[in-house]
Amino acid sequence: MIYKWDIIGHETQISQLEREIETGNISHAYLFSGPKDVGKFRVARIFANILQCPHDFCRRCKDCQMIANGTHLDTLLVPDDGSTIHIDEVRELIRKTNLTAQSRYRLIVIENIERMPIEAQNSFLKTLEEPPGRTVFLLTSTKVSQVLPTILSRVRLYEFSNVDDPVLETYLRQKFGDHTDLSEIIEIAQGRPGLAIHLIKDPVALSDQRNVYRQIDFFLKKNDLAQKFQFVESVSKGEGATGKTLELFFDAFSRYLRKLLFDYMRQKDHPLRARFTLKEIADLFESLEKTRYLIDRNVNLKLALENLFLQTEK
Ligand SMILES: [Zn+2]
């Protein structure tokens, strides 16, 4: 590696980006797609910094310092704050960089481009077709299926995947020493460095994860439809926090089932073996993924979850 990226994993993608920098083969738009919390936005930010720094990513010059503290006029960062991205905002970003543009590039780094509604994506397409001079868009997405194919065809696509556990573990040990909950955190994080670091730094988030995991364990071990439906009721009624609660729930459920499948296949003893066959667990896993997909597409949340829970009863 030529530059010090300080990124966990993704060596192939980083080497490829470095080759593009070395050969000056920079596209006017990139899309980094892949699971949440694996480091796509971070890679985009550092890539932006390397492009802007006139001294090989020195981390000391004016450009590097301004990018680090988010005040660089030609490097605009739009992290995902949960809000929808309107086309006017994108136009405003372009206008802002047009005003200054004293740096090597005008860089617009947008996290989770799928936050742009389809009409906005259509308008954005025109900008991608005729980008203002030296403008580079660095976009990320965790749901590339919600991005217009016409946009995908105009960006240089980089796919990111989860980081291997040993890579993650080595890095976390170096950075945080022997944290007591490290193996549990690595298991929860499932190859997502962003989540692992968040859990190390925030004990409340870790305990939330544990609680959901325990709840799922209980739901799978017991026949108690009333309690399961009560859970569904509370999730589907919850307002602001619904998205987060659901994400936590689906992540934990998926992790639980994946581990269970793995244990079954390795013939490991498991208390659930008497209750579910391997096929039933595999079916449940498939239903879980399907439910998640449907909920993303706004089907009736309550019905979808109730159907899923019916499969956990015997
Ligand atoms: Zn610099």
Image (cartoon, rainbow, N blue to C red):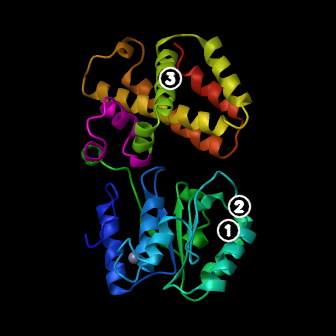
Q: Which residue is mark 1?
A: 121
Would you say residue 191 sits in the magenta stretch?
yes
In this rendering, the answer to whether 160 lies above or below 154 is above
User: Callout 1: helix, strand or loop?
Assistant: helix
Residue linked to disc 2: 117
- Label 2 neighbour load within 10 Å: few <14, some 14-19, many 20+: some
Residue 42: image location, x then y, percent: 44, 60
Judged from the image, the secondary structure of the residue bearing numbered disc 2 is loop
Q: Are marks 2 and 1 in contact (CB under 8 Å)?
A: yes
**Residue 211 marker:** 3
Report if residue 171 lies within the magenta region: no
Per the model, the C-alpha gap separating discs 2 and 1 is 6 Å
Q: Is residue 131 visible?
A: no
| Helix, strand or loop under label 3 | helix
Q: Nearer the viewer, residue 73 or 134?
A: 73
Between circles 2 and 3, the one closer to the viewer is 3
Q: Is residue 17 above or below residue 117?
A: below
Q: Is residue 84 left or right of residue 104?
A: right
For ligand 1, which image quadrant applies? Answer: bottom left
Residue at (46% x, 77% y) in the render: 62
Residue 25 location, quadrant? bottom left
- CB at disc 1 and ligand 1 closer than 8 Å: no
Q: Quadrant of residue 273?
A: top left
The alpha-carbon separation of the residues under discs 2 and 3 comes to 34 Å
**Image quadrant where residue 148 sits:** bottom right
x and y, in percent, of residue 276 in the image: 42, 18
1 displayed left or right of 199:
left
Range drawn in magenta: 172-194
Q: Amino acid at mark 3?
A: Asn
Query: In the image, what residue type sits under mark 2?
Result: Pro
The chief SS type of the magenta part is helix
